[in-house]
Amino acid sequence: MSWKNQGGGPWGNGPRGPWGTGPQSSGPTPPDIEDLIRRSQDRLRNLLPGSMGTKGAILLVALVVAGWMLSGFYRVEPDEQGVVLRFGKFVQLTQPGLNYHLPYPIETVVTPKVTRVNRLDIGMRLSEDTRRNATVMRDVPEESLMLTGDENIVDVDFAVFWVINNAEHFLFNVQNPEGTIKAVAESAMREVIGRNNIQPILTGARQNIEQGVHELMQKTLDSYGAGVRITQVQMQKVDPPSQVIDAFRDVQAARADAERAQNEAQTYANRVQPEARGEAARIENAAQAYKERSVVEARGQASRFLSIYDQYLLAKDVTRERMYYETMERVFGGVEKVIVDQNATRGGGIVPVLPLNEPARRPTPVTGPQTQGPAR
């Protein structure tokens, strides 16, 4: 029975319907075995002249078989991983270097790049402008416009970076890996955006959103067995729709001014409050020191009085006289004094005393009006 009449496998032809052939896989299509054998026999008949005989035919067949066997050697690059397929079924994974598999069509090998970081843009497309020699970004609103948790619309452009972490799952579990990653990325971003209000999305919640999308995408792709690891989710542009972006910018500017005024007020409060607390603490410490000093002085004076009283009880006259002298010394210690001998006044008058310390003193100026007494 010819293979070409059967339904296609992962690389075969699908059944024909009313609109043409079925979906085609991206892998190589194996030829029909009967046609391959028949063509090989015809070529051998044409190549073998009658004079070569049986030995020449055997030698030629051996050379063909040796060449066919040598065709099984293949090389896997450092950034690749070899996936060996036997009649379309996965057999093994091979590492970078020179490897061997059974020749085609028994076994084939696919070498996907497992270390290359792939980028997928959502909501935008980058294209090269050959005339300007620059990269032009085209917006895709059907992918970027999303609804927030407070029923606002936001325009989100972001990029997803991914690598292959399981070549077998990547090749066989998902039919269109890149399309699947794109659909999962858009769905995850819409879900995370729908949980947040528009204000945090436009200001400070970008990192949290990227982390949430990253985790949700990885969880979903792992459940599919896609063999893909998401390395980073990077939000490129987060803006309101173009129709209302000017009004949103005015609102943002007003909020920035309000935050600036609040920060200035908080800075002033942070500067004044510590000063006031420090002054209050200083006054409290001074009052406490005055209190302690007054108490200590009072206790000292009371102790001194009690000690003097004890001495007074022992010698009243001596203690009384000493107290008198000490009191006079304290009272007259800072007063200028003129001592006049009592006997000098009996002889006819007081002897003038030269005030030696008077030149050092300055007369006190008289301020205010002076009044004269009545003339006598």
Image (cartoon, grey):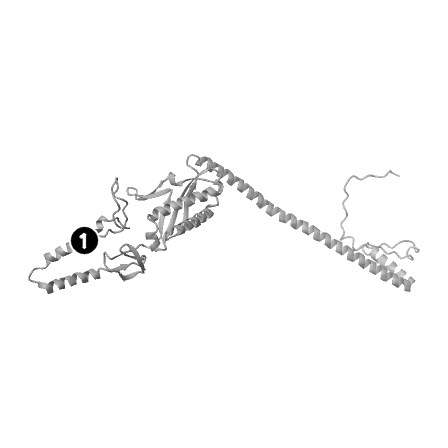
Considering every residue shown, the one lying at the far front of the view is 1
- Closer-to-camera residue (355/268): 268
301 sits to left or right of 9: right
126 sits to left or right of 349: left
104, above or below 132, in the image? below
361 sits to left or right of 339: left
Q: Which residue is mark 1?
A: 34
Residue 294 position in % (x across, y down): 77, 55
Amino acid on which disc 1 is placed: Glu
**Residue 287 in view, yes or no:** yes
Q: Quadrant of the C terminus?
A: top right
- Closer-to-camera residue (150/301): 150
Which residue is painted at 70% across and 53% down in the image?
285
Count the numbered circles shown: 1
Which residue is painted at 42% across and 34% down in the image?
243
- Closer-to-camera residue (354/50): 50
Which residue is painted at 53% across and 42% down in the image?
259
